[in-house]
Amino acid sequence: MSLQEASAPTKIGFGRKSNMITLTAAAAVKVKALLATETDPSLALRVAVRPGGCSGFSYEMFFDAEVAEDDIVKEFDGVKVISDPTSAGMLVGATLEYKDALSGGGFSIDNPNAQRTCGCGNSFS
């Protein structure tokens, strides 16, 4: 599935359809490269929103092999992304980006639902 097709919600295995976070092409390439170094082929990128951080909520991303029946699942160029329903609702319209740079590089989330963010970019309300 291409990134253009991924804008339409899909159902993969467990999970429900949703318009949660979208990965840019660069983010999908980087996540796929990171997954290739792992030994478990069932791993997917889990993106979650948790209470905490200096603005009220913080983002959490990690590789996870477990998909709950109510998890939201989408795929971007071969990268499976999962999120719990509450987090997915807070990530509708958000974009996960990746920039390869000496300064200011790495993953970042652009979330139009965030009313306020902190200086570190990892916390929002």
Image (tube, grey):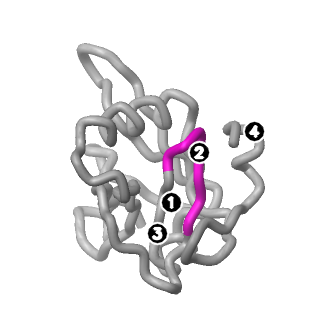
CB under 8 Å between discs 1 and 3: no
Check residue 78 for magenta coloring: yes
Distance from label 1 to label 4 (Cα)? 24 Å
Residue type highlighted by circle 2: Phe
Q: Which mark is residue 114?
A: 1
Q: Which SS does the magenta portion mostly show?
A: strand
Could you tell me how many numbered marks the image carries? 4
Q: Nearer the viewer, mark 1 or mark 3?
A: 3
Q: In the rendering, at what x and y percent does residue 100 appear?
A: 35, 19
Q: Which mark is residue 8?
A: none
Distance from label 1 to label 3 (Cα)? 18 Å
Distance from label 4 to label 3 (Cα)? 20 Å
Residue type highlighted by circle 3: Ser
Badge 4: how crowded within 10 Å, few (<14), some, or many (20+)? Answer: few
Badge 2: how crowded within 10 Å, few (<14), some, or many (20+)? Answer: many
Q: Of the two numbered discs 1 and 4 on the same chain, state the one appearing first in sequence.
A: 4
Q: Which mark is residue 76?
A: 2
Residue type highlighted by circle 1: Ala
Label 2 residue SS? strand
Q: Of the two numbered discs 2 and 4 on the same chain, state the one appearing first in sequence.
A: 4
Q: Nearer the viewer, mark 1 or mark 4?
A: 4
Identify the residue position indicated by label 4 in the image.
4
Q: Of the two numbered discs 2 and 3 on the same chain, state the one appearing first in sequence.
A: 2
Distance from label 1 to label 2 (Cα)? 23 Å
Distance from label 2 to label 4 (Cα)? 9 Å
Distance from label 2 to label 3 (Cα)? 14 Å
Which residue is at a point 49% across and 57% down the rendered structure image?
A: 81
Identify the residue position indicated by label 3 in the image.
83
Residue type highlighted by circle 4: Gln
Q: Is residue 33 above or below residue 52?
A: above
> Where on the picture, by quarter, is residue 108?
top left
Residue bounds of the magenta highlight: 73-79
